[in-house]
Amino acid sequence: MEQHKSKFINFLNSGCPVSTNFRAITVDAFLEFGFVFLFVMVLKPYVIKELSAVSVIQVSLVTAFIFSFFSWVYNLASYRKINVKDWTFKKDIIRYSKNVLLATVFFLSYAYTALHYIYYDEIVFFVDYFFITGFLYIFFIAIIFYFFSKFTTYFNVVKGISKQNEILVKPNNFTFNGKNKDEIIKTDLSKLIYIQAIGHYIKIFLKEEGDNVEMKVIRNSISKIKKIMEGHEEMFQCHRSFIVNINSIKSIAGNSQKAYLILKNIKERIPVSRDNYKYLKKMHAFSENKNTVQEKKYLEVV
């Protein structure tokens, strides 16, 4: 007995997978909607089996909506408080129980009204102890769906970790292929300075021996070039037409309205969009230069 108790306590205190972003929480809500809808449609619990086919569909849809909607709202309101590193099954079960209790209050209120007033003519007899029976059904569904959701969340977490590991081991060598015949550029991350899109062509600026810079041109789109470098955070798209190697950035000048990057060993100024200016200032703490007359002229035409 003590051994089983100890295992149960260890389980409660063990790490629990949890969804902590809008997309994952929304996906969980849709899964819950489908799960509850199918449960009610197929099993027809309580007196639902006495209803007509149309009424069963209506009850199933409303029931699924109530549970999935309140679950979605509750999880969105609480996920920011979750610390994934020390999140346990004990904490998760308590949070889930509060979520289920909230939805149960609204559902039982709907179910009582629907069965006693809306679908009254279709029901031959009522089961005694409505609220107790309804709560037991909900408790049963909640347990099944809880472990189902934990399985899907765990699967997504493992999938995400695997994807991150794939990114971490990605080589720093790139091969850029152009749309024209024999357009191939092979280089590595350390040589890339920045990439510029002009119309249907891509200019790739590479660092050579000393302070020399070589420019190569291929016919391609910046979206496809960016996809090749996916997972390499060093290559940052600061503007719709420019991708820069952040290791090549010397400083950032201008302001959030008109800003540009000053690169090492490069005379050209690289424009920066408003949102990316704020990001670069915050994440990399580049010093803001005072604009010279020439720089001000440049900012006016960018």
Image (cartoon, grey):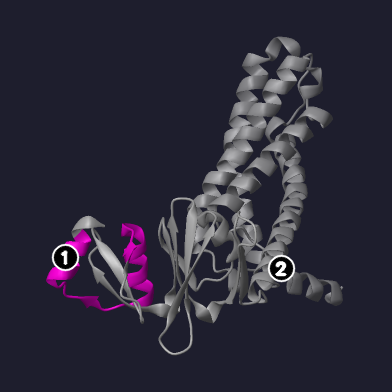
Q: Residue at x 70, y 27 (%)?
A: 60
Tell me the CA gap for discs 1 and 2: 47 Å
Does residue 63 appear anywhere in the picture? Answer: yes
Residue 98 magenta-drawn? no
Q: Mark 2 points at which residue?
A: 162
Query: Seen from this angle, which residue lies furthest left?
Result: 293
Please name the amino acid that badge 1 sits on.
Lys
Task: Tell me which label, 1 or 2, sits earlier in the chain.
Answer: 2
Q: Where is residue 239 in the image (x, y as percent from the top left)?
A: 39, 59
Q: Where is residue 90 in the image (x, y as percent from the top left)?
A: 66, 65
Does residue 102 appear anywhere in the picture? Answer: no
Query: Seen from this angle, which residue lies furthest top?
Result: 121
Around disc 1, counting alpha carbons within 10 Å, would you say few (fewer than 14), some (14 to 19), or many (20 or more)?
few
The C terminus lies in quadrant:
bottom left
In this view, the mark in front (1 or 2): 1
The numbered disc on residue 259 is none
99 in relation to 274, above or below: above
Instruction: Give the residues in magenta.
Output: 270-299
Please name the amino acid that badge 2 sits on.
Ser
Q: Do the residues labelled 1 and 2 touch (CB within 8 Å)?
A: no
Q: What element carries label 1?
A: helix
Q: Which of 111 and 250 is in front in this view?
A: 250
Q: Name the residue under label 1.
A: 296
Q: Residue at x 74, y 47 (%)?
A: 145
Query: Seen from this angle, which residue lies furthest front?
Result: 181
Q: Where is residue 253 in the image (x, y as percent from the top left)?
A: 25, 71
